Image (cartoon, grey):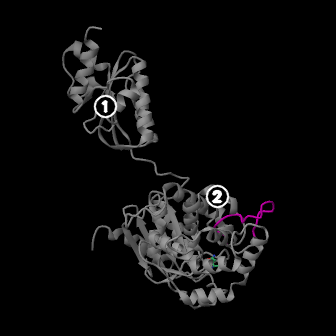
């Protein structure tokens, strides 16, 4: 037993809640999938620190099917870039079933990369490299997302290859519109292999977590795709990942997600969690019934809905006051009066643009008086990204222009190297190791001649 078992308990509880659901049908159009066990039900969650939790049949193998699509799309985007990929496949929800003949009337492009038509094109776009043929590259990419070497379920591949005439027909049709850059038979064969790659629910959660974590696999630490590509894939999953159920899913569950006809389902809570479910019986949109229910419930319980609360950072500003109320304030009347004109702001945590805006606003609040001074205490700040730094620097240079003296408590040089700060703020911003020294310095400077 351990403390984090509590997370597993939450998954077990959800598992127990939906295990008895008997709705839905297994996919039978790929004959081999009809042999899956309808009672299998697994749930998994992987955090941005790579901690994994699971309940039920989380290590039962099954094939990726359409859950492979976002990851193949990621590889195409990483290889060719959004503009080139976008020439061949769109990014609009089709509002139609996964296997619909859904081609844009004017361009002939498939609507998006999450439906079969678009996924076949996406796969076809991935070029052979000098080191490896296209399918090998796809398998390697999927494996890096999962953090382990994946393989192909040859029986499922053969079963779909023997019966997949609709997908072959789609490929020929796309080729007839001039939007399939390669041989239709070869394209569909690679696509079938990609769909037959074997995973379990835990793998899926790691794959989803890698997208949620900006393209770095949180378990292995490996960068699989760039943050830009991860964001592009999540965006298309959010609008198109659940086919004709995408709008409703985004409305109710609020997460980028992708389902597959073997019963796999992933959802990604950006910067939070990768979630996955496996349960073969499907609803009319081709989505796992138990998976939908469980991940929907999980998103609600963990408050993951993207539109509801886009990861509000904890409080950035921990103190906004004037120096006269600090414990270190002097008792003399004249000094006290000086200290009243020294604003003090303390910040904490990691600063991004949003957090930096709060800090600047607090600087203004701490004493809007001209000719006053301000001390910005950054000792509890753990880091600042380049956008935050640029905003802080320009805010501090505005303060100087307004005639407000500033000093920082910044023993860790969170504001950047002194040279850079001088260049950006147009002043030698005094830095101190303690708040008392900084307050004393600006108070003296105000009192001094001039
Ligand atoms: N291989 C399946 C097909 O092309 C994938 C479909 C799905 O999972 N929705 O029909």
**427 horizontally vs 444: left or right:** right
Quadrant assignment for the C terminus: top left
Region in magenta: 101-115
* Ligand 1 sits in quadrant: bottom right
Q: Where is residue 140 in the image (x, y as percent from the top left)?
A: 48, 73
Front residue of 305 and 239: 239
| Image location of residue 208, percent across then percent down | 49, 66
Residue at the disc numbered 1: 418
Residue 201 place in picture, x, y as percent? 47, 76
Question: x and y percent of residue 110 in the render?
Answer: 72, 66
Prevailing secondary structure of the magenta residues? loop
x 28%, y 35%: residue:
410
Label 1 crowd bin: few (<14), some (14–19), many (20+), radius 10 Å: some
| Residue labelled 2 has its Cβ within 8 Å of some atom of ligand 1 | no
| Residue pictured at 62% horizontal, 89% vertical | 159
Residue drawn at (33%, 71%) of the image: 5
Q: Residue at x 58, y 81 (%)?
A: 193
Question: Which is more toward the observer, 266 or 106?
Answer: 106
Tell me the residue that label 2 is attached to.
Answer: 84
User: Is 216 on the left-hand or right-hand side of 291?
Assistant: left
């Amino acid at each position: 037993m351990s403390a984090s078992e509590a997370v597993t308990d939450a998954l077990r509880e959800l598992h127990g809640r939906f295990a008895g659901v008997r709705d839905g049908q297994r996919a039978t159009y790929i004959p081999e999938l009809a042999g899956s066990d309808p009672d299998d039900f697994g749930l998994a969650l992987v955090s941005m620190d790579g901690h994994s939790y699971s309940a039920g049949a989380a290590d039962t193998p099954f094939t990726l099917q359409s859950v492979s699509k976002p990851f193949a799309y990621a590889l195409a985007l990483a290889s060719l870039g959004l503009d080139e990929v976008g020439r061949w496949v769109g990014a609009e929800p089709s509002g139609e079933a996964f296997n619909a003949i859904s081609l844009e009337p004017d361009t002939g492009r498939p609507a998006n990369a999450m439906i079969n038509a678009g996924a076949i094109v996406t796969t076809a776009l991935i070029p052979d490299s000098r080191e490896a043929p296209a399918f090998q590259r796809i398998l390697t990419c999927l494996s890096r997302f999962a953090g382990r070497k994946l393989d192909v379920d040859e029986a499922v591949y053969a079963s779909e290859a023997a019966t997949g005439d609709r997908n072959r027909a789609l490929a020929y049709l796309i080729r007839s519109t001039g939007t399939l850059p390669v041989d239709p038979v070869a394209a569909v064969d690679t696509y079938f292999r990609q769909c037959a790659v074997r995973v379990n629910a835990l793998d899926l959660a790691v794959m989803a977590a890698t997208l949620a974590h900006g393209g770095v696999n949180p378990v292995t630490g490996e960068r699989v795709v760039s943050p830009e590509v991860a964001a592009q894939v999540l965006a298309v999953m959010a609008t198109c990942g659940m086919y004709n159920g995408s709008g409703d899913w985004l409305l109710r569950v609020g997460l980028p997600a992708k389902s597959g006809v073997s019963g796999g389902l992933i959802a990604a809570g950006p910067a939070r969690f990768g979630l996955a479910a496996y349960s073969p019986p499907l609803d009319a949109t081709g989505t796992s019934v138990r998976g939908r229910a469980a991940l929907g419930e999980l998103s609600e319980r963990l408050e993951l809905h993207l539109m509801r609360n886009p990861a509000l950072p904890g409080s950035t500003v921990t103190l906004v006051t004037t120096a006269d109320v600090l414990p270190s304030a002097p008792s003399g009347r004249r000094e006290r009066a000086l200290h009243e004109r020294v604003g003090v702001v303390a910040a904490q945590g990691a600063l991004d643009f949003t957090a930096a805006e709060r800090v600047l606003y607090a600087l203004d609040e701490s004493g809007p008086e001209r000719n006053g001074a301000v001390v910005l205490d950054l000792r509890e700040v753990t880091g600042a990204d380049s956008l935050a730094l640029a905003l802080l620097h320009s805010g501090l240079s505005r303060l100087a222009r307004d005639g407000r003296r500033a000093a920082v408590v910044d023993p860790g040089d969170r504001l950047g190297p002194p040279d850079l700060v001088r260049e950006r703020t147009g002043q030698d911003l005094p830095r101190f190791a303690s708040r008392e020294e900084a307050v004393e310095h600006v108070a003296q400077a105000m009192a001094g001649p001039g």
